[in-house]
Image (tube, rainbow, N blue to C red):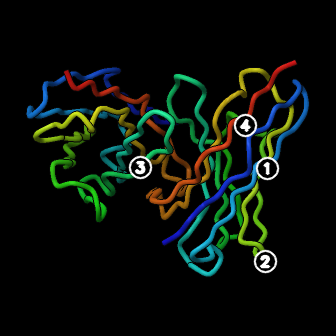
Amino acid sequence: SYALTQPPSVSVSPGQTARITCSGEILSKQHAYWYQQKPGQAPTLIIYKDTKRPSGIPERFSGSSSGTTLTLTISGVQAEDEADYYCQSADNSVTYHWVFGGGTRLTVL
Amino acid sequence: QVHLVQSGAEVKKPGSSVKVSCKASGGTFTKVTSYAITWVRQAAGQGLEWMGGIVPIFGSTIYSENFQGRLTITTDELTTTAYMELSGLRPDDTAVYYCARDVSGEMTYWGQGTLVTVSS
């Protein structure tokens, strides 16, 4: 099975740009997704198919992909963006067989 | 707008089973050709763990090998409800269990989560 690796934590000051990476061999072959999770809440999809943003998600959230690395960029970070962020992709080439990254805690200083 | 409402918290003894429900409203997942229901769990302070899913249009289930033999996912079309049953419970199965509508990996709608506590 494939693994997705994220940094455990990222810290930024308000107004700065946060970048959270997700790396894994499968990312060069399969789409990936990003979720935001705040304490006590279910995850929220914020990026799908590597770069697309669902309706209602602020424009400051963007996704990019290069080879085996995915990047979630949050421009002009706000205090409310402090949360855990998870990437997700296929565990292999089998449909509906998924894996999550370990998660990254974003701290807004 | 799809809503997924899960059943309430459970406290179980080691070795027993738990069955968590996930009722969809605002659309039936069996009428939409590309919808599946995926189950994800999260232990306290830990990350998200994919458990498995059911794909109604294929009539099939897919399970993580981490749960093979212990996990059963089913659906009831009449009540638009999905179920996740985990047997042989252990203390390390204590977690919040989520259901999510899954469109080829895109999980837009999630249930509120169900806390399952396994303790003697």
Residues marked 2 and 4 touching at CB (< 8 Å): no
Q: Secondary structure at mark 1?
A: strand
Q: Earlier in the sequence, mark 4 or mark 1?
A: 4
The crowding category of the residue bearing disc 2, from other C-alpha atoms within 10 Å (few below 14, some 14 to 19, many at least 20), is few
Alpha carbons under labels 3 and 2: distance apart: 28 Å
Mark 3, residue position: A44
From this view, report whether residue B75 is shown above or below residue B118.
below
Subunit that carries the residue with mark 1: B
Q: Earlier in the sequence, mark 1 or mark 2?
A: 1
Instruction: Specify the quadrant of the image occupied by residue B86.
Output: top right
Q: Amino acid at mark 1?
A: Thr
Alpha carbons under labels 2 and 4: distance apart: 27 Å
Residue B35 location (% of width, % of height): 56, 69
* Marks 1, 3 in one chain: no
Mark 1, residue position: B72
Label disc, if present, on residue B78 of the rendered structure: 2
Alpha carbons under labels 3 and 4: distance apart: 25 Å
Q: Amino acid at mark 2?
A: Leu
Residues marked 4 and 1 touching at CB (< 8 Å): no
Given this view, does label 1 or label 3 mark the residue nearer the observer?
3
